[in-house]
Amino acid sequence: MNELVGLFRENRDIIRSTGWVITDPKSYAWWDGFDSADKIVISAFLVQLTKWESVKRVIRTLEENSLAKVESLADLDLPSLETYFKPINFYRTKARRVMSFARFVKEMGGLDKVLVLEKRPLLLKQEGVGEETADSILLFAGNQPIFPSTEYSRRVLSRVTGRDMSKRELPGFVYSNVQQDLYLYKILHAGLGAVGKAFCLLTKPKCDRCFLKQVCEYNYR
């Protein structure tokens, strides 16, 4: 795993091109250069089944209207929020989910009271928040030491190690092979996601172009 971390550092420009920024451990900028926990959380709801460029456009519009904070959205009415979310697929459903989450956050006393590991069970009870979303916002918006299980990470690590594993097994594998460290969890998540998106495709992976090819069991089959 240390070798993977080294390769991710060396190829940070490729990783940046997929939307991940390798930077200081507690910086919000890992999430495509965002500068707040609020923007990370809002975009995590919006990005499901939606192009990332559309999500960023909505975030910019919210920012221009001084609404790029979760608690600010709690004070809007649903039709107004839907108007802002129109560039997003399933915008009505997502507006309802974001508004519900925003009001939950406000009742809890703010994002800093919500984005802690102890509140993970409560996060998972919110509409639209599955394990991947909860763990991603805990790691990148809350700076909590947890490793999100994604299909990209599962596929890439399974191929690199030659050990087929399920998404449920993935976090345990990481915890067993990497010390608990915010930076390491973030760079692994970002790097594996970048490789999965750019090279390690489900069918016809681009092994010849992948910077992990020297350490990947799948490439030597």
Image (spheres, rainbow, N blue to C red):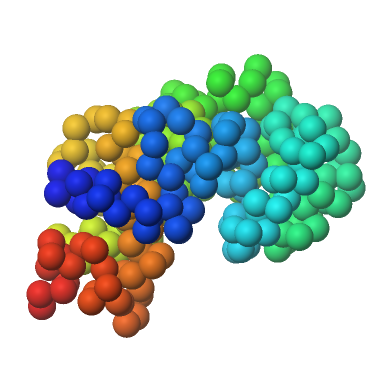
In the visual, does 75 lie left or right of 129?
right
Q: Is residue 48 above or below residue 140?
A: below
Q: In this view, does 197 lie above or below 56?
A: below
In the visual, does 169 lie left or right of 17?
left
Quarter the C terminus occupies: bottom left
| Residue at image point 38% right, 67% down | 198
Q: Is residue 52 above or below residue 119?
A: below
In the visual, does 9 lie left or right of 42?
left
| Residue at image point 64% right, 42% down | 42
- From the top left corner, tell me how far across and down residue 68 is, in percent: 72, 36
Q: Which image quadrant is residue 147 in?
A: top left
In the rendered image, the residue lying farthest to the bottom is 204
Instruction: Give the mark count.
Output: 0
| Residue at image point 63% right, 59% down | 53
Q: Which image quadrant is residue 24 in?
A: top left
Residue 212 in sight here: yes
- From the top left corner, tell me how far across and down residue 135 is, in percent: 44, 40
Q: Which image quadrant is residue 174 in?
A: top left
| Residue at image point 10% right, 75% down | 220
In the visual, does 128 lie left or right of 207?
right
- From the top left corner, tell me how far across and down residue 136 is, in percent: 46, 42
- From the top left corner, tell me how far across and down residue 92 is, in percent: 78, 55
Of the pair 112 and 211, the residue shown nearer to us: 211
Of the pair 176 and 36, the residue shown nearer to us: 36
Q: Is residue 117 above or below residue 218?
A: above
Residue 131 in sight here: no
